[in-house]
Image: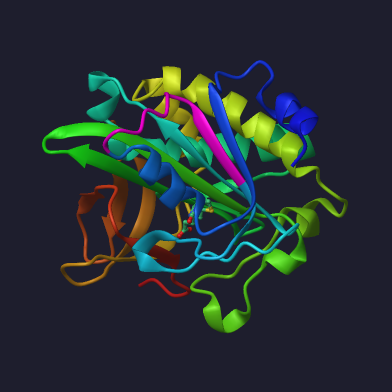
Amino acid sequence: MKKDDLERVIKGTPIQSIYAFDTITSTNDFGLAQLHEGADAPDWTLIVADKQTAGRGRLNRRWVTEAGAGLAFSLILRLTDNEAEHVNLFSPIGALAVSEALEAGYGLQPAIKWPNDVLLGGKKTSGILAETSWLGEVMRGLVIGIGINITPAAIPPPEMLMFPATCVESETGHAVDRLDLLHMIIASLAEWRKQLATPEFYGAWEGRLAFRGEAVRVERPAGDPLIGIVLGISANGDLRLMLDKGGEVHISVGDVRLRPVVEFK
Ligand code: BTN
């Protein structure tokens, strides 16, 4: 990545520091290392790579980033005490920022599969992995990693997919400049960070919620899967579900898996 290109990416954004790599293991791993003792990466440090050799997804899955095919980056954010109280909302913020950029820049209509996968035409095009680094009880910072399938080469083979996938260029039908998209995402994320946990934020998130009014199955690490109709998002970011057996439940952001179900009785 050229210096001029990177200057264009960060112009008008709060980015304080940039690391750009042709190849790296994982931009999130690099970000977490920068938060370890002795490292002093500032708030709004950007780490971007053309290729990741050990990209990671949620729930210990792999995230493949081949050169020229995807957009893979992480941001180091040093959270204020108030922000740290809402740390779970940073991956939805990322999803909102990716969605807004795809809509504003390319006229697409992204939806957010709760809590934070971005779908185009019902297929996953972007995933977010937010991780924190702690020193005892004190949070050193957050690394929010965003991966976006840009060209068809970024779409993993079907046997690796947990959910149908697409890429931005298949949806736009034309080439997309990854650095333009990166700029728009960072700018949008900076705006939503200021509105963390506000009614506007929850409203925007809910407004983009995928499968609203439809039946979904939510798999949880502990407990049986839940099947119900997606009602919306509660005042603290929980998913509101009307259970098939009756009654509304709220599910907190965590390691859950949500997918549509075809039948619902
Ligand atoms: C998911 O959908 O499971 C989350 C995928 C997150 C992938 C991004 S790519 C940039 C950053 N570096 C990583 O190793 N993972 C995240």
Q: Is residue 44 shown in magenta?
A: yes
Q: Of residues 10 and 18, which is closer to you in this image?
A: 18
Residue at x-position 48% and y-position 46%: 145
In percent of width and height, residue 74 lies at 51, 42
Q: Residue at x 77, y 37 (%)?
A: 2
Residue 263, how many percent across, how many down?
44, 75
- Position above or below: 67 against 182: below
Q: Answer whether residue 8 is visible to the viewer in this image.
A: yes
Quadrant where the image shows the N terminus:
top right
**Relative image position of residue 159 (x, y in whole percent):** 56, 84
Main SS category, magenta section: loop
Image position of 12 (left or right of 262): right
The part of the image, by quadrant, that contains residue 156 is bottom right
Q: Residue at x 53, y 78 (%)?
A: 160
Q: Residue at x 75, y 31 (%)?
A: 3
Taking 243 as reference, is 110 left or right?
right
Q: Is residue 6 magenta?
A: no
Considering only vertical position in the picture, is 80 above or below 181?
Answer: above
Q: How is the image coloured?
A: rainbow
**Looking at this rendering, what residue extends furthest in the right direction?**
174
Q: Which region is colored magenta? A: 37-48
Q: Position of residue 87 (x, y in %)?
A: 29, 35
In front: 208, or 187?
187
